[in-house]
Amino acid sequence: MQIERYNEGISLKRSVDSGTDEQRKTVQGIISEVRKDGDAALFSYTERFDGVKLTDLRVTQEELNAGLAALSEEHIAVIREAAENIQSFHQKQQRNSWITTDDMGTMLGQKITPLDAVGVYVPGGTAAYPSSVLMNVMPALVAGVKRIVMVSPPGKDGKLAPVVLAAAKIAGVTEIYTVGGAQAIAALAYGTDSIDKVDKIVGPGNIYVALAKREVFGDVSIDMIAGPSEIAVLADKTANAAEVAADLLSQAEHDAFACSVLVTTSMELAEGVSQEVHKQLELLPRKEIAEQSIRNFGRIIVCANMSEALLAVNELAPEHLEILTENPMEAMAKIRHAGAIFLGRFSPEPVGDYFAGPNHVLPTNGTARFASPLNVDDFQKKSSIIMYSEKAFRANSEKIASFARLEGLEAHARAIEARK
Amino acid sequence: MQIERYNEGISLKRSVDSGTDEQRKTVQGIISEVRKDGDAALFSYTERFDGVKLTDLRVTQEELNAGLAALSEEHIAVIREAAENIQSFHQKQQRNSWITTDDMGTMLGQKITPLDAVGVYVPGGTAAYPSSVLMNVMPALVAGVKRIVMVSPPGKDGKLAPVVLAAAKIAGVTEIYTVGGAQAIAALAYGTDSIDKVDKIVGPGNIYVALAKREVFGDVSIDMIAGPSEIAVLADKTANAAEVAADLLSQAEHDAFACSVLVTTSMELAEGVSQEVHKQLELLPRKEIAEQSIRNFGRIIVCANMSEALLAVNELAPEHLEILTENPMEAMAKIRHAGAIFLGRFSPEPVGDYFAGPNHVLPTNGTARFASPLNVDDFQKKSSIIMYSEKAFRANSEKIASFARLEGLEAHARAIEARK
């Protein structure tokens, strides 16, 4: 890996695939067909894009059970424990409705209500990850969402991957449809005979899924449109080069656009990591992918001191940040932008990817400047509560009417004065 | 107003103006010009669209002071008191970062950080409302945002409305630029020599502003794209027809697309309100607007009983909901979807529009099903914190590696095993 000296204004931003005009038109066409023809359109697109002719989209209880039965007991136990950890962490995000009152009898507050229905998109093929099912479903469950609908495209046999069904079963999802692509997003947003519409759609997908989410945004809520995954490791001379290299490679194996960056105050570590990356690369089953990612997006940035390194990390605003320094907590306090922060040697990123409990759906491509990990708030909404007593009303009515007239809204003032 | 019996499946949804292809192209052109030419493009578009030739975009401290001086002491006092109420309510939304620890020494948590910089768009002309300045700025201030940037298009004299400057001064905004339209959104999203870029853009605007926000969405965060304003009044026979009518009209005067709906269990009230609306309409200065709104979007829906009426209100998912029943609190508990809920006779909507403290930026067009009033969370983001102790790591490392291998990600497993 190439080693560079820190220069102000670094960025992890890569050109995200935002689709061609033609892809956008295709997606718009699919959405309008599904709105017009409902299930018939879903069956027809499934035949065309997935190459299977289905007559029923709903996954049966038997198929769910079979998915679970296909897994080893060891794997079931691990997924269960991960689900419990995820549930437990997200329960701590849960908030209560609140009200305040004052001497005049005014009551103001904020009511928290879970969304009625949420759709979770799960990609098919090799990107069908059980951890992704857990991470998208558990926060919705904890938030109190009553109806959680999973959709995923069928494999060549017309079925969903057993491991995905097993994760759904463990998470407690019971409403699952074998449909993917833009047509699945359209069905979730607008409803068909088989699939009732939802209020929000979450989960990763290919460019057609991402474009479809953009199109239905506003009619339903969506999560962020995720870019390729990324990690920044902030390390000083106390870090172990072989461990840092392994962590960078665990990100790089995701896909060729994944991005792994080391920010360090130690030239010795920088050189050690560079060598280790190439040594370990040779031994990886996904070597080709990881190699491309490291070559195109891997960076080692050497900083003069820790405050420069912290500046660099905040400029990067990475999705994942590992802090492998003598005092990780001290550094953490100064991080302003990062999706998830992993502290110390014993918290390599995979600890959080699968198991610890915090969500692995994180803001990518510099959006940690303004976006958050998927969390319980994403599945609830707030309503303001306003109750003025007669006394409070009388004490303030003239002021309120005066403000209304300042804005030229006479009927607003009269709604106040109608109470006199 | 026409009176109808309740029928399942009612909706407030109106066809929102989502812009034409031509408008979208215009906006894309403006954005790319601003990205290319920066300030020069801003000056040129301001001359073309606002008809004024500016040489400096930044509003001076003197102009801000002059704005305040143009206002009566009474109005200054009202705006100040409203600002204090808004600040006080939003302070109650403030959350703390938290961590949890367990016996193994694992530490998990959530760090809350304010956004670095936020842009607030304020429309020009007759839609330049001081209340809108307060409602968009105060939550950002309370959230701890250090840099709040206001933009607004100049009037024919090349200046901003004094009342808007006064509200900005009272709210404490000091960085203000005389620029509007899609060009202002582009400058906020990507930066120019005069205007540093921000992380999030909030505030209402015309169709070009809305389209520009949609275009930059993803590169920066945006608030919801707001539709026309709406109110639902839930009332039983204890409500006063003249008061209900005045409340419906206060919504109707906003614009011809505003929507006012009465949902009631009392046919007598329905008839009384219908008459009162037409009587009061005659006396309104904005009679023509309100009349159009009532004719096209006004509805009186009579329900068989309170549970049917609550069903109707939840189907509507209104932006504003007034509850004028014998037991407003009892009804409130059953409301699942509403932006702001006003309880009882002495809480007509204008109490909350200007003064009480909760935000008046609310989800419209049925989006209260999944969206919330503008609030402090909108100006902060979360980062997950994960620190495993050596003991916790050793106890779980095999399980984590096993999960990684189940997903076919060998390098993830090796990052774990590198610590052995």
Image: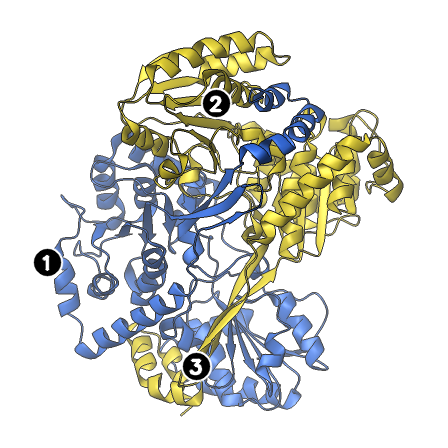
Chain colours: A blue, B yellow
Residue type at mark 3 is Thr
Identify which residue, A146 or B41, lies in the foreground.
A146
| Residue at 45%, 25% in the rendered image | B15
Chain letter for the residue marked with disc 3 in the picture: B
According to the image, label 1 marks what residue?
Answer: A62
Chain letter for the residue marked with disc 1 in the picture: A
Q: Report whether residue B32 is seen.
A: no
According to the image, label 2 marks what residue?
Answer: B259
Of discs 1 and 2, which sits in the foreground?
2
Q: Distance of mark 3 from mark 1, alpha carbons?
A: 39 Å
According to the image, label 3 marks what residue?
Answer: B106
The answer to whether residue A23 is above or below residue B126 is below
Residue type at mark 1 is Glu
Identify which residue, A251 or A45, lies in the foreground.
A251
Residue type at mark 2 is Cys
Would you call the spot at circle 2 few (<14 residues within 10 Å), some (14-19), or many (20 or more)? many
